[in-house]
Image (cartoon, rainbow, N blue to C red):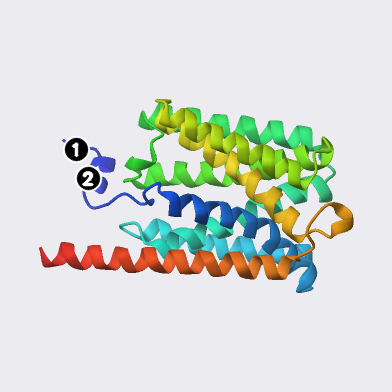
């Protein structure tokens, strides 16, 4: 007799996108938007931290509900959820650091332990951490829990490196970008694909955050002074164009499948 998860999976297609160059471009830009978008809404738009946190958490809950209800990967729903997870993950770390005065050393370690625990339980229950098999509700819940934790961990680790350790925005972006490139090289040389993916996913968060700070912060603080509004607008525009292209391609594939 089939288990409920197997029965459900027969009606599902994989709920996450293929890992391509477009995937990483959108992911890195979404991390930057998470860094700049939260600042823009709270400061530039004048909403304040509390209202911004409540609004973003509410929008994330709605987007995640849509994502969980979908039967197949739908680009605009998936990437909207990722952008909102990025913003909320940033806000969680900022709340701990700025609101509760939790040391970045402590929060980075805590998020690392939490992520390790999620991976341990996920692998223990499902036998895999591969994103190619997100075909049941339970696996998708594990996936999104891990994604949220990677964003919070990446934010804390990025702030720890650029601020507490004094690397600065440009050096921080260079360091995390180089580490991400090194993971890609290791994968090309035969490293485990699942392990390489999750390491890269974690590293691209502080890389995107450092890049966002570099672009938005004033020159007196080591940034380029472009500002949160323009950076968010530019990156969101690129994200929307890439997601629209993915949505169009997905619709064409669905139509072709129906025609068969």
Image side of residue 159 versus residue 116, left or right = right
Could you tell me residue 250's position as x and y percent? 30, 63
Could you tell me residue 76's position as x and y percent? 43, 65
Query: 62 above or below 15?
Result: below
Q: Which residue is pictured at 63% across the width and 70% down the height?
A: 233
Query: 210 above or below 47?
Result: above
Farthest residue toward the right?
A: 220
Residue 32, by quadrant, is: bottom right
Asked if the residue at tag 2 contacts the one at tag 1, i.e. Cβ–Cβ closer than 8 Å, the answer is yes
**What is the distance, in whole Å, between disc 1 and disc 2 at their CAs?**
6 Å
Q: Which residue is pictured at 67% across the width and 63% down the height?
A: 37
Check the picture and name the quadrant holding the C terminus.
Answer: bottom left
Check the picture and name the quadrant holding the N terminus.
Answer: top left
| Residue 2 circle label | 1
How crowded pointer 1 is (Cα within 10 Å; few <14, some 14-19, many 20+) is rated as: few
Q: Which residue is pictured at 63% across the width and 63% down the height?
A: 56
For label 1, the SS is loop
Query: 186 above or below 206?
Result: above
List the residue tagged with mark 2: 7
Image side of residue 190 versus residue 235, left or right = left
Could you tell me residue 117's position as x and y percent? 55, 30
Could you tell me residue 107's position as x and y percent? 73, 37
| Residue 116 circle label | none
Query: Which of the pair 236/46 is nearer the observer?
Result: 236
Query: Which of the pair 91/245 is nearer the observer?
Result: 245
Mark 1 or mark 2: whose residue is earlier in sequence: 1
Query: Which of the pair 83/216 is nearer the observer?
Result: 216
How crowded pointer 2 is (Cα within 10 Å; few <14, some 14-19, many 20+) is rated as: few
Farthest residue toward the left?
A: 260
Is residue 121 shown to the viewer in this render? no
Query: Which of the pair 44/188 is nearer the observer?
Result: 188
């Amino acid at each position: 007799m089939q288990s409920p998860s197997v029965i459900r999976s027969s009606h599902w297609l994989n709920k996450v996108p293929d890992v391509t160059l477009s995937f990483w471009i959108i992911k890195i830009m979404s991390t930057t938007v998470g860094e700049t978008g939260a600042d823009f809404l709270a400061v530039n738009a004048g909403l304040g931290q509390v209202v911004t946190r409540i609004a973003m958490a509410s929008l994330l809950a709605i987007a995640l509900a849509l994502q969980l209800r979908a039967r197949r990967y739908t680009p605009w729903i998936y990437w909207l959820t990722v952008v909102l997870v990025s913003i909320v993950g940033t806000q969680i770390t900022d709340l701990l650091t700025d609101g509760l005065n939790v040391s970045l050393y402590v929060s980075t370690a805590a998020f690392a332990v939490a992520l390790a625990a999620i991976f341990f339980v996920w692998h223990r229950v499902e036998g895999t951490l591969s994103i190619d098999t997100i075909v049941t509700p339970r696996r998708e819940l594990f996936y999104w829990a891990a994604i949220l934790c990677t964003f919070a961990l990446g934010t804390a680790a990025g702030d720890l490196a650029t601020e507490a350790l004094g690397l600065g925005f440009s050096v921080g972006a260079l360091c995390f970008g180089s580490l991400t490139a090194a993971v890609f090289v290791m994968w090309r040389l035969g490293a485990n694909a699942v392990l390489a993916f999750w390491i890269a996913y974690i590293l691209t968060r502080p890389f995107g955050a450092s890049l966002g700070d570099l672009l938005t912060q004033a020159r007196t603080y080591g940034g380029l002074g472009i500002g949160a509004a323009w950076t968010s607008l530019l990156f969101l525009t690129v994200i929307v164009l890439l997601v629209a292209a993915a949505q169009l391609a997905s619709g064409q594939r669905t139509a072709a499948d129906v025609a068969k």
